[in-house]
Amino acid sequence: MLLSEIAKHLGGVLIGIDQDISGASTIEEATPSDITFLANPKYRDKVHETSAGAIISGEKLETDIPQIIAKDPYLCFARMVSLLYPEKPIIEGISEQAYVHPDAEVDENACIFPHVYIAQGATISGGCVIYPGCFIGEGASIGRNTTLHPNVVVYDRCILGRECIVHAGVVIGSDGFGFTWDGEKHFKIPQKGIVIIGDYVEIGSNCTIDRAALTSTRIGSDVKMDNLVQIGHNVTIGDHTIIVAQSGVAGSARIGTGVVLAAQSGVAGHISVGDGCTAAGRAGVTSDLPPGKIVSGFPAIDHRQWLRAQNVYKDLPELVKRIRALERRLDAIDSD
Amino acid sequence: MLLSEIAKHLGGVLIGIDQDISGASTIEEATPSDITFLANPKYRDKVHETSAGAIISGEKLETDIPQIIAKDPYLCFARMVSLLYPEKPIIEGISEQAYVHPDAEVDENACIFPHVYIAQGATISGGCVIYPGCFIGEGASIGRNTTLHPNVVVYDRCILGRECIVHAGVVIGSDGFGFTWDGEKHFKIPQKGIVIIGDYVEIGSNCTIDRAALTSTRIGSDVKMDNLVQIGHNVTIGDHTIIVAQSGVAGSARIGTGVVLAAQSGVAGHISVGDGCTAAGRAGVTSDLPPGKIVSGFPAIDHRQWLRAQNVYKDLPELVKRIRALERRLDAIDSD
Amino acid sequence: MLLSEIAKHLGGVLIGIDQDISGASTIEEATPSDITFLANPKYRDKVHETSAGAIISGEKLETDIPQIIAKDPYLCFARMVSLLYPEKPIIEGISEQAYVHPDAEVDENACIFPHVYIAQGATISGGCVIYPGCFIGEGASIGRNTTLHPNVVVYDRCILGRECIVHAGVVIGSDGFGFTWDGEKHFKIPQKGIVIIGDYVEIGSNCTIDRAALTSTRIGSDVKMDNLVQIGHNVTIGDHTIIVAQSGVAGSARIGTGVVLAAQSGVAGHISVGDGCTAAGRAGVTSDLPPGKIVSGFPAIDHRQWLRAQNVYKDLPELVKRIRALERRLDAIDSD
């Protein structure tokens, strides 16, 4: 693809000689046939070491390498990668080595790989790709163009939207964790609800999302979950929210829209996290957060307050010494 | 089902007009044909907003809605839900799309779905439901009426009790994590033991339970595990213990009966946790706990002590200021 | 096997009567036909309670039980266990219930169980054992003598070395977690790279290892990962590194050789951890570490500094009292 075409496609301006580009790579690993990008001016010096054939940048760089100057070079680069390496269409049809219940509805334009199990009353829409080892429970429904990677399990009656990507090993709709003591042993609270997942959702490998006890666990549209995330029963998660790897949201928590829960964070049960909040890595949110709050630590507190406290924390032994010195000085004064 | 019948079934007292109830729901979402419950008097005001057709309560409520007054309304409600939404019996038999080794013993009343693999010498008891994608290793044994949801893996020789529920993606009996340096690389300590799981155990999605090196990893009866829990090799867990999501128990730890390990908690290797202990959310237990202890934090300390320390923690910068002020005052006195 | 043979095999010295040994067990559970070991002199007293038929020890013990004195008794014992309980060779061939694409290359000495899916262009080397439910994506390659336990998923083009053991439910090569806001929703950064895994690697159950965005996520040789570990995209992990259960390494982090990341620890994105570093249990590494550092806490600091700070932490309320006392004493002086 010619740089001039790329520039046009991205709405950018080409500076330097027009030439053909066939790949995209990082600034460190790009070859002369690759395009790369510079998003963070901090790494500007790397431009002098790269072998890339072209660079997408937000500002003019001092280099002879052809540049495309465009707003948001990272987004532009991502678009280029999509363009240069398009997804291969998958047109396998419905495998005879899959099990499809006669009362399931599978669109003729869906692709069902071998060793898939589709139960009675399930609905698989057009454009879906269901990889080997997936299980779609009774009455479950998968929206248009959604991809389930291998070994995804969708329990009965759960609903996934369209254009979702669910990575391998994800479990959607397993029983919520609810028991009550009956005097002799734990009595299981029946988990009769479902999970409803919006559109354009991506769910990382081996995540677990529990069904509600009576109603629905709801994941909004454009929610993005990293790997090994746990979502408890009756949780609601607003649109565009991002949940990074190994985080957990406990039962009945309500997470707003545009929230970020960074890696290994947690939200306690029944807690409400307002729109646009950020919980930093490892944060453990144990009380309701108003919109826009940034919190850290466990129990999570205001991020700046946490930074200040954390800063003192590591010097606590020093603090003890200062207190002891003060005590001695006062003792000396008192004994005068 | 008539309210009078329900009241009789629960051993409760009906106040108000007898009527037919066909469903159960939360106090917020219940419709006039649903029964709901009030377990926590804190939410008493919600009674005035609910559309429920009846309420199970521990005490008489000021409302015209028919009430069933009964001890432990939450347990009563759970029983009602079980009654109103009974599990559909699964009577699929042994699928021809499953692989069952000729030397495996599968009870004729077990249900084996397509794409299940049952190895030589494995035993599947009557009433078991083994969903698609499950793997039962050589000589493993699954007790009566136990359900394995899709893609559960049971390694060779492991033993599950009866009436267990194992959710999708759980791995039972993978190798414990043991290596010793041989001078050039890590030498694998062979993991030749097994896992033994009691009766009435429920295990959440994608949990992992490792086999012992030489003996057994033991999970007691009526143990309830949430999703993504990790149990190391040689661990023993007492009856009725509850382990909430994303917690981990390291190798050779001994957890007593009736213990609660809350979400994202951890117990270090070889540690002994006494009967009835509670580790709060995120607690990391690194020393033995006597029975009945409640601990928090990492390393976990007495819960109340942790609360007090945590309370000071966030004001540490303030403390530093007070110390500095004291130092200045003393300097002023000294320089007099 | 005679003790004299075992001693010869281990390069040790037999003290006591020569006799036949048929098994190996822990010091607590060994029977007279078992050999056991004493690695930690701390447990020396257990020798007087064991029923073992022989003991491997680093030093002469005061007991009539036959002993084999050898350097590194734990390694010797591990070798004995391997010898006494050899792995049964698996010679099933390629199951007709597996799906093998006509353009996949499967060595005739590989074992492919039922319900395995091997995609176009994939390569399975000799001696591989691919258990039921595994998925090998397009163009992926599995080295000689590597075992994939049930339900392992290897996405397209990923490369595993030889002599690896991958436990059940592991996902290798799912998309890295990368999005950029396009003004209306999250735009997915295409994840076109791969995962490359070295030789002699062991990966615990339900781990997740993401593919790089453009290049490779690299796991060195002899790396050992426990269960439920998360490895982000573009991460590199050096040879011999050990990562204990439920730990996570965020995108683009570089972990050196011989590193230990203890249980439930984490390394932040783009961080560099030097060779031979140790992150203690629960440590959260948020800044680069020079080789050989031992760190604890979150954010992780020098382990000894953390121990001292932690020691003060739990007595913080006491510290506040001391400060208040000082303030009162000074007030009294001032008011004199």
Image (cartoon, coloured by chain):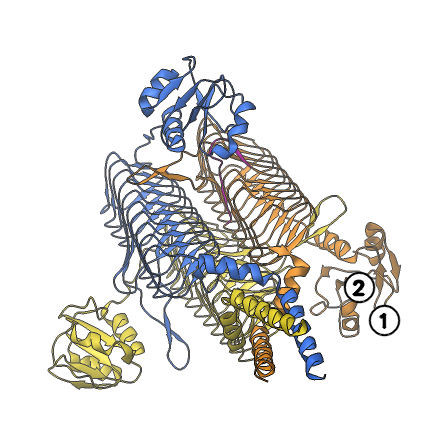
Chain colours: A orange, B blue, C yellow
- Tell whether position A216 is magenta: yes
- Pick the residue in front: B275 or A45: B275
With respect to residue C70, does C330 lie above or below? above
Distance from the alpha carbon under mark 2 to that under mark 1: 10 Å
Q: Quadrant location of residue C331?
A: bottom right
Where disc 1 sits, the SS reads loop
Tag 1: amino acid: Thr
**Residue neighbourhood size for the residue with mark 1, other residues' Cα within 10 Å, grouped as few (<14), some (14–19), many (≥20):** few
Marking on residue A63: 1
Horizontal side of residue A13 vs B251, given as left or right: right
Horizontal and vertical percent for residue A115? 44, 42
Q: Which residue is mark 2?
A: A55
Please tell me the numbered disc located at residue B31. Answer: none
Q: Position of residue B15 (x, y in %)?
A: 41, 17
Where A334 sits versus C310, above or below?
below
Between discs 2 and 1, the one toward the N terminus: 2
Both labels 2 and 1 in a single chain: yes
Name the secondary structure under disc 2.
strand
**Subunit of label 1:** A
Residue B167 among those drawn in magenta:
no
The location of residue A118, given as percent across then percent down, is 46, 35
Dot 2: chain letter: A
What stretch of residues is rendered in magenta? A207-217
Question: Disc 2 vs disc 1: Cβ atoms closer than 8 Å?
Answer: yes
